[in-house]
């Protein structure tokens, strides 16, 4: 080894070693043999001092508080959009009939609030959605618990519900009109039908997904069926239930919009329909804003519920 | 002589595999018995039969009515705080609350009674599981490799703690383990399971607390390891 090395070094002088090894043409036999040896035997070049850095997560967004700079940048987009709208309306680039100006919308909103029209319609919509959600969530929860907790329940209920859930509720809405007329019942039922399935699915999978080892531990310590459900199964399924709630809230809004567009005497949907008839673009925009706020508040509600109902999830090892 | 466990001719098959093949054995009241065996020898199956989680195909099994179990993983309920986890097997009466607090102190976790399980280390969680088992005042304590997932240092401390708790509460203990040292440090008797039947049943008559370096300890250790198919260089 120590003898071969100087040969190799000499032979490789001025030649890239890998090239020499691969082609081998211009090199003597000795140097061809020696070249790989040299590579294997040569001690790794003594490394210089390493650059040490503070350990940090790689490629991950920094956690913790959003800086004010970050917040400012984030609001930039929406503000630009609003500004473009305002400029477009002021210069006449956007026609008033196509998209009402921001100030027209603000004026319409003030007018609707002051006259009480907005609240009268909003409260009707809220009641409708609330009743529908109440029924839909209760039915979804009951069915989900039944099929999640009992094998027989699962065998009897799940296939039927999995089949029915694939039917879009909008397709069933006309049938409900046929059955229940165009009154309040039909509207509440459309919402109930739409919200029942997402809640059922998430309840079912949440209950089914509870760690059987923990359930076993509860059984070994002699917990009654009821205590097992209350102390272990339902809390463990709660995250899924909240996902279901989030989906149901979202779908309830869609169902509400659809339901209110056919013969509603009051409601945000009714307001929209009449605004459309009278070409009141600014009122339409107010209604869209109301729906958007509604959706946002629903999402915030679920987030708040997640924080309050699942305190053990927020806990972390110090 | 009163028994805490009495198993006769136990047979349990899983498909075509015999997990228990005519096993018979008993454990006396207050006795500390360690159950050794290689993986698949039927240890866990026996423990699951004893804790009522599996039913025998043949044979009889009788166990003390008041029994508790500690699994290899702590199996704490994530949505219940430490104290409530300890109280799982009992109601929330004033007496049991008091006792639960005391047990948490015995296992050295008095300050953590309001903590969530996710915030505990492995050793702490396993101590909560021990306290939870002891609160039921068991006549029989079943331990399924309870320290297998812990680091070596924590395991040594847990051995001491378990010996202490056993002395104080005196339940019969069946400790399933892979660790020959653990068995010899803690048990009055060591059983070795092979192919679902009892291969060895040796008393460990060493004074407590036991030292691993004692010559009798070393001899017994070698014998049991050989029984388990491990031959160490001398």
Image: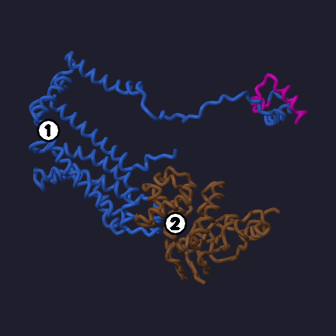
Chain colours: A blue, B brown
- Magenta region includes residue A23: yes
Where does residue A200 sit, x and y in percent of width and height? 31, 56
Q: Main secondary structure of the magenta part?
A: helix
Where does residue B160 sit, x and y in percent of width and height? 64, 61
- Magenta region includes residue A140: no
Please name the residue shown 33% across and 47% down the image: A305
- Tag 1: Cα neighbours inside 10 Å, few (<14), some, or many (≥20)? some
- Which residue occupies the foreground of this view, A92 or B173? B173
Q: Quadrant of the N terminus of chain B?
A: bottom right
Q: Quadrant of the C terminus of chain B?
A: bottom right
Q: How many marks?
A: 2
Q: Secondary structure at mark 2?
A: helix
Tag shown at residue B133: 2
Left or right position of A273 against B122: left
In the orientation shown, which residue stands out farthest toward the top? A91
Q: From what the image shows, is residue A145 above or below residue A304? A: below
Q: Chain of mark 1?
A: A
Q: Secondary structure at mark 1?
A: helix
In the orientation shown, which residue stands out farthest toward the right? A3
> What residue does disc 1 label?
A119
Q: Which residues are magenta?
A: A1-24
Q: From what the image shows, is residue A149 above or below residue B10? A: above
Q: Chain of mark 2?
A: B
Where does residue A237 sit, x and y in percent of width and height? 38, 56
Left or right position of A16 against B7: right
Nearest to the eye among marks 1 and 2: give it: 2
Tag shown at residue B27: none
């Amino acid at each position: 080894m120590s003898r071969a090395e100087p040969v190799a070094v000499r032979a490789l002088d001025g030649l890239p070693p890998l090239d020499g090894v691969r082609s081998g043409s211009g090199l003597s036999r000795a140097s061809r043999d020696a070249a790989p040896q040299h590579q294997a035997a040569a001690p790794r070049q003594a490394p210089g001092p390493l650059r040490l850095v503070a350990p940090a997560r790689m490629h991950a967004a920094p956690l913790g508080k959003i800086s004010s700079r970050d917040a400012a940048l984030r609001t930039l987009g929406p503000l630009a959009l609003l500004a473009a709208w305002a400029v477009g309306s002021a210069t006449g680039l956007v026609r008033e009939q196509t998209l009402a100006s921001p100030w027209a919308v603000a004026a319409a909103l003030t007018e609707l609030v002051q006259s009480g029209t907005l609240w009268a319609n909003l409260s009707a919509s809220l009641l409708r959605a609330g009743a529908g959600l109440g029924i839909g969530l209760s039915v979804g929860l009951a069915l989900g618990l039944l099929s999640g907790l009992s094998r027989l329940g699962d065998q009897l209920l799940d296939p039927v519900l999995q089949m029915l859930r694939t039917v879009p509720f909008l397709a069933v809405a006309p049938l409900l009109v046929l059955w229940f007329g165009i009154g309040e019942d039909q509207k509440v039922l459309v919402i109930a039908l739409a919200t029942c399935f997402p809640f059922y699915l998430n309840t079912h999978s949440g209950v089914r997904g509870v760690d059987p080892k923990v359930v076993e531990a509860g059984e070994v310590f002699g917990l009654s069926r009821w205590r097992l459900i209350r102390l272990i199964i339902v809390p463990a399924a709660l995250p899924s239930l909240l996902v279901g709630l989030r989906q149901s809230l979202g779908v309830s809004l869609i169902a509400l919009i659809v339901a209110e567009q056919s013969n509603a005497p009051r409601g945000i949907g009714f307001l929209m329909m009449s605004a459309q008839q009278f070409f009141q673009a600014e009122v339409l925009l107010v209604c869209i804003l109301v729906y958007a706020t509604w959706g946002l508040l629903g999402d915030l509600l679920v987030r708040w519920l997640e924080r309050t109902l699942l305190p053990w999830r927020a806990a972390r090892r110090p | 002589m009163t028994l805490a466990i009495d198993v006769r001719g136990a047979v349990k098959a899983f498909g075509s595999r015999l997990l228990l093949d005519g096993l018979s054995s008993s454990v006396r009241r207050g006795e500390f018995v360690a159950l050794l065996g290689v993986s698949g020898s039927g240890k866990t199956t026996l423990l699951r039969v004893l804790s009522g989680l599996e039913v025998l195909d043949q044979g009889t099994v009788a166990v003390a009515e008041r029994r508790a179990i500690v699994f290899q993983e702590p199996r704490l309920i994530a949505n219940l705080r430490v104290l409530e986890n300890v109280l799982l097997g009992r109601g929330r009466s004033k007496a049991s609350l008091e006792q639960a607090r005391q047990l948490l102190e015995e296992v050295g976790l008095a300050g953590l009674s309001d903590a969530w399980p996710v915030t505990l280390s492995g050793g702490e969680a396993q101590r909560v599981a021990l306290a939870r088992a002891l609160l039921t005042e068991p006549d029989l304590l079943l331990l399924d490799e309870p320290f297998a997932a812990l680091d070596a240092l924590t395991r040594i401390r847990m051995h001491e703690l378990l010996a202490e708790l056993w002395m104080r509460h005196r339940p019969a203990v069946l400790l399933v383990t892979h660790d020959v040292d653990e068995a010899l440090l803690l048990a009055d008797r060591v059983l070795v399971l092979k192919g679902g039947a009892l291969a060895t049943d040796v008393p460990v008559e060493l004074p407590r607390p036991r030292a691993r370096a004692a010559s009798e300890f070393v001899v017994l250790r070698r014998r049991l390891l050989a029984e388990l198919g491990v031959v160490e260089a001398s």
